[in-house]
Image: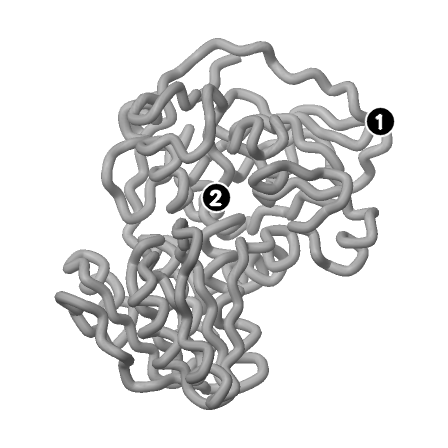
């Protein structure tokens, strides 16, 4: 089969590889129909965050082509969303709903598709066939009313945006939301769209990039085009999202969080020591949440929201859709959201 392979920083290419073998009775073989480039994928391919070579891609909608002997929920021809983190559904962590901490599937970067050996050696989604373990637990039915190009964005970046605001808005209906920064380009904009769909109060967006600011404004946010150093804080909101990837930006977002509010960070802090304003957080009772998205945990809720019609459409975020055959040329090109789609016209 063919797969899109990260070779070295700045180089991805189509390569021939052995097709996966269905030797696990709990697994399925799936043919990816459309794959979205995660915000992290671009940095992984451009800068070599993980050692290669390895097949890329972990946001996918696919069609099942074969099932293991004991798989009961799925059959050939079903269209499914593939949570990007691999989990078994049976271990204590999975039984507690902590799927991203699965005890059976572990890896240095967390067990995941499209991360190579650092993700446990699972395949990448930009390929002819993908082996998916624990299929009855892991897979989620793709919404019938979403195109593959829209549906494939749900398993990671949309899930990440959802977990930033949905729990807070469930606890505080109608609360204001503030999103600061655009380091993860699509996640911040998906957050705006989901906050609006979930009937947040004021939704504000502060960023340095003109294109992202314009997109956020079209999505209904009150936009601040920021320049220079991050301020000490913006006007406070009960729910804030740090998407700056910068220590000063993180501090600004935390200080912009209202009393007993929650700040979630989606931007990776690569520094070994990142200062945070603990005294201010202590005084105001602020909760700070930092982690990767938990794909399997939130994907059913995200899918239901997207399938409801009229509430949230992932296609409202600027998306560049290219034909499957052009994935090697497009993977390193700038785009707020990139999708490679088998059905896209050349």
Q: Is residue 170 left or right of residue 264?
A: right
Q: Which residue is drawn at the image coordinates 46% and 73% (left, top)?
A: 263
- Compared to residue 77, the image places residue 283 above or below, namely below
Q: Answer with mark 1 or mark 2, whichever residue precedes in sequence.
A: 1
The quarter of the rendered structure image containing the C terminus is top left
Q: Residue furthest right?
A: 70
Q: Secondary structure at mark 1?
A: loop
* Residue wearing tag 2: 152
- Position of residue 100 measured from the top left corner of the image (x, y, whole percent): 65, 50
Q: Which mark is residue 69?
A: 1
Q: Which residue is drawn at the image coordinates 50% and 82% (left, top)?
A: 286
Residues at marks 1 and 2, CA–CA distance in whole angstroms: 27 Å
**Label 1 with label 2: CB-CB less than 8 Å:** no
- Position of residue 228 measured from the top left corner of the image (x, y, whole percent): 14, 66
Q: Which residue is drawn at the image coordinates 54% and 58% (left, top)?
A: 291
For the residue pair 77 and 203, the one nearer the viewer reads as: 203
């Amino acid at each position: 089969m063919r797969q899109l392979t990260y070779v070295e920083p700045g180089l991805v290419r189509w390569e021939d590889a052995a097709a996966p073998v269905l030797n696990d009775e709990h697994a399925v073989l799936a043919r990816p129909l459309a794959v979205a480039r995660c915000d992290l994928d671009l940095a992984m391919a451009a800068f070599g965050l993980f050692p290669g070579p390895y097949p890329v891609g972990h946001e996918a909608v696919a069609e099942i082509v074969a099932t293991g002997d004991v798989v009961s929920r799925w059959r050939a021809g079903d269209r499914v969303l593939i949570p990007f983190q691999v989990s078994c559904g049976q271990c204590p962590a999975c039984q507690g709903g902590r799927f991203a901490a699965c005890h059976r599937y572990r890896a240095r970067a967390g067990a995941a598709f499209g991360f190579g050996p650092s993700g446990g050696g699972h395949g990448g989604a930009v390929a002819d066939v993908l082996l998916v373990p624990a299929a009855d637990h892991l897979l989620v039915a793709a919404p019938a009313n979403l195109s593959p190009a829209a549906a494939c964005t749900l398993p990671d970046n949309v899930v990440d945006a959802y977990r930033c605001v949905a729990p807070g808005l469930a606890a505080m209906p109608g609360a204001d939301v503030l999103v600061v920064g655009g380091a993860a380009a699509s996640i911040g904009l998906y957050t705006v769209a989901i906050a609006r769909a979930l009937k947040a109060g004021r939704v504000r967006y502060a960023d340095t990039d003109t294109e992202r600011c314009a997109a956020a404004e079209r999505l209904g946010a009150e936009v601040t085009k920021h320049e220079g150093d991050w301020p000490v804080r913006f006007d406070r909101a009960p729910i804030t999202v740090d998407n700056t990837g910068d220590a000063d930006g993180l501090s600004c977002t935390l200080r912009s969080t209202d009393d007993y509010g929650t700040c979630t960070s989606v931007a990776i802090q690569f520094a070994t020591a990142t200062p945070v304003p603990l005294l201010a957080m202590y005084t105001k009772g602020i909760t700070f949440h930092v982690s990767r998205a938990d794909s399997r945990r939130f994907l059913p809720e995200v899918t239901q929201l997207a399938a409801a019609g009229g509430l949230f459409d992932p296609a409202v975020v600027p998306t560049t859709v290219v034909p499957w055959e052009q994935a090697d040329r497009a993977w390193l090109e700038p785009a707020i959201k990139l999708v490679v789609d088998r059905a896209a016209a050349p």
